[in-house]
Image (spheres, helix red, strand yellow):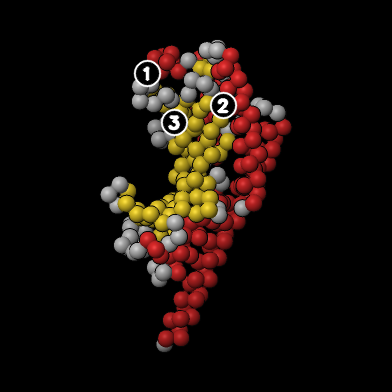
Amino acid sequence: MIQQQQQQQQNQKKINNGLLLLRIQKCCNDLIDNIHIDRITKTTGLENVPLLSNVVMTVHLNQKQDLSLPVSCFKNCKRNVAQFASLVIKYDSPKSTGLLFSAGILVSVGTRSKNVALYSLYILRKELNRIGSGPNFVSADVSNYVFTSHLGYWIDIARLSTEYEQYCVYEPDKFPGCSYQPPEIFNNNGGKFVLFEGGAFNIVGVTTILDGKKAYKYIISFANKFKKEPRNDSDRTKLVSNRVQEKKDAVEQQQDSIIY
């Protein structure tokens, strides 16, 4: 009887590992497509391209987790329940941060590709198995893609926030960026643009690569009518420097993605 139970457990582990490998393979295929598109856009020199700067992936486990475990059970683990009701676990390879919630939810933040995020969560699950928790993945979904790019010119975000007041949040005394959420693009799904006067902008809250690219095409066309001249020559130099750094980041992102 005991041998049968052990055999069943081993078979179940094989099934779970097989499903996980299929998910990783699918993520890798998606990543290859994204790299191919990036290579096409990067052939235009310093032309602006959207950079995938952060992927937030959420995994639901098949059981709740005990957060009272000593933090020494994990490497680079911190716990401050008063501020954040989860265990915060940092990894150097791949560079990411994992969040473990008592409800049986794992969250990965800080990676720049979907498959690396999934891989970091797989490492965290192995850590939980090592200490006897033994959870399995039930579902894994990207809850937020963050894209970063630059328009290549300065924009008048004060005028933008005035003309589109119903879709903007701009409080320069608290935050220098303007949050812009056009309904025709994000359809009240939580996505938005964060625009800065110097031309930098972020796309946050989208859950697919396709939505991010659609938003990017929209803002490139939309922001042109709010274009303005830099305040002085030092601002012009800074603008060019930011575009060069953006190109370097694009190359580093591609290298990181290929490694994993």
Query: What residue did someone put label 1 on?
Result: 165
Residue 183, which numbered label? none
Q: Earlier in the sequence, mark 3 or mark 2?
A: 2
- The residue closer to the viewer here, 107 or 249, is 249
Q: Is residue 116 above or below residue 173?
A: below
Q: Classify mark 3: residues with Cα within 10 Å, few (<14), some (14-19) or many (20+).
A: many
- Residue linked to disc 2: 150
Three-letter amino acid code of the residue under disc 2: His
Secondary structure category for the residue under label 2: strand
| Crowd around label 2: few <14 · some 14–19 · many ≥20 (10 Å) | many
Q: Are marks 3 and 2 in contact (CB under 8 Å)?
A: no
Instruction: Name the secondary structure under disc 1.
Output: helix
| Residue on which the image places disc 3 | 192
Q: Is residue 257 left or right of residue 6?
A: right
Q: Quadrant of the N terminus?
A: bottom left
Please state if 166 lies on the left or on the right of 130 as rendered: left
